[in-house]
Amino acid sequence: MQEYAVRNNSYTDFILTGFSGPKEWRQLLFIPFFLMFFISVAANSALMCVIGSHRTLHSPMYLLISALAFVDLSVMIFCVPSMLLSLLLNWNHISLLGCLVQMFFVHIAGAFQSTILLWMALDRYFAICTPLHYNEHMAFSAFLKFFIVPVLRNTILISAVVGLAGTLPYCQSNEIDHCYCEHMALVTLACGPIYVNNAVGLITAFCIPAVDFILIITSYVKIFVSVFKSGKSSQKALSTCITHIIVISMSLFFALTSFLSYRIKNTISPNSRTAISITYLLVPGCFNPIIYGIRTKEIRQQVMKKIVKRGRGVVGVMQ
């Protein structure tokens, strides 16, 4: 009877209260977040357009870069617009169903960010360590075994995390201390036991970003060893791999810090915790097009061709 009463009083509408403070301060935050959103959407859209419109860029590596741009763009679309409206106009209400839908898409996109980086590391490993068998390894039928398992893993685990969150009664409060529906920010409002949710969340964090990170590092270590053994000029390969490792390490650091801040007693303020989560979501979308796109010679050449062609067109119209 008591359990029925609890569930009957469960909140179905919530208020996102991330970055609590004076209205003027929240509106000021709108500017940098909007700029990051605009840069990310423009850069990732342009990158996908360049890769999609040139057949010479339809090799596995460039298609993976395009997939990463699509995932980064998806994170922005599902998370940032509502956050911007909340900061600027204080539109911060969201239903439980809307919260769960946003949670699923944000977390599944975040999961595939690390998985695509793993696929890119495998692509570089096959290209550098086994160049004679690269086409064989990266053929669709052969690469399928590296594709199916991570996709099933990501989908099942994220679905379990969101599904379990949807079964909880929320009667403690309807104020989510975040800018979007982060899993633990919502679950901590439940009035029932959440140890199962905690356990599944920990398993998900280990099995997706942590495992992907370990496999990525393993691939790059093997690449380093192969390059040094070959005695060939390795400056470009090392520069690329080291850059990727730095970016991946920073992303994992912010992801795990955000994830563990809800599970371990700490002195991190709610606003700092929200800022860390937002950094994990927004920063990769701004910098990945540069690191994996513009720094890649073939993509850079196509971008420059488009700029020059458009510049000539503008000059022709003016004349």
Image (cartoon, rainbow, N blue to C red):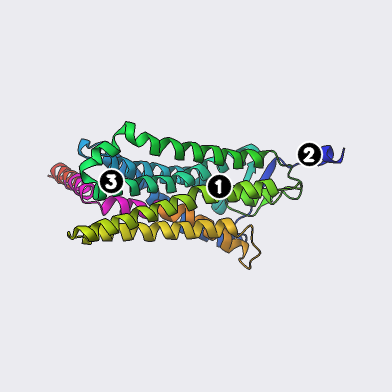
Q: Is residue 160 visible?
A: yes
Which amino acid, mark 3? Answer: Phe
Q: Kindly report which numbered mark, 2 or 3, lies closer to the viewer in this rendering.
A: 3
Question: Label 1 crowding class (10 Å Cα cut-off): few <14, some 14-19, many 20+?
Answer: many
Specify the amino acid type for callout 1: Thr
Query: Residue shown at 34%/36% (left/top)?
Result: 143
Residue 260 lies in quadrant: bottom right
Residue 73: give x, y in percent of width and height.
41, 44
Name the element at disc 1. Answer: helix
Q: Which residues are magenta?
A: 285-308
Q: Is residue 264 left or right of residue 115?
A: right
> Position of 56 compared to 38: left or right?
left
Q: Secondary structure at mark 2?
A: helix
Which residue is pictured at 13% across the width and 43% down the height?
A: 316
Outermost residue, right side: 1
Q: Where does label 3 land, which residue?
A: 126
Please tell me whether residue 205 is drawn above or below residue 3 in the rendered image. Answer: below
Location of mark 2 (residue): 7
137, above or below 298, in the image: above
Q: Nearer the viewer, mark 3 or mark 1?
A: 3
Q: Outermost residue toward the top?
A: 141
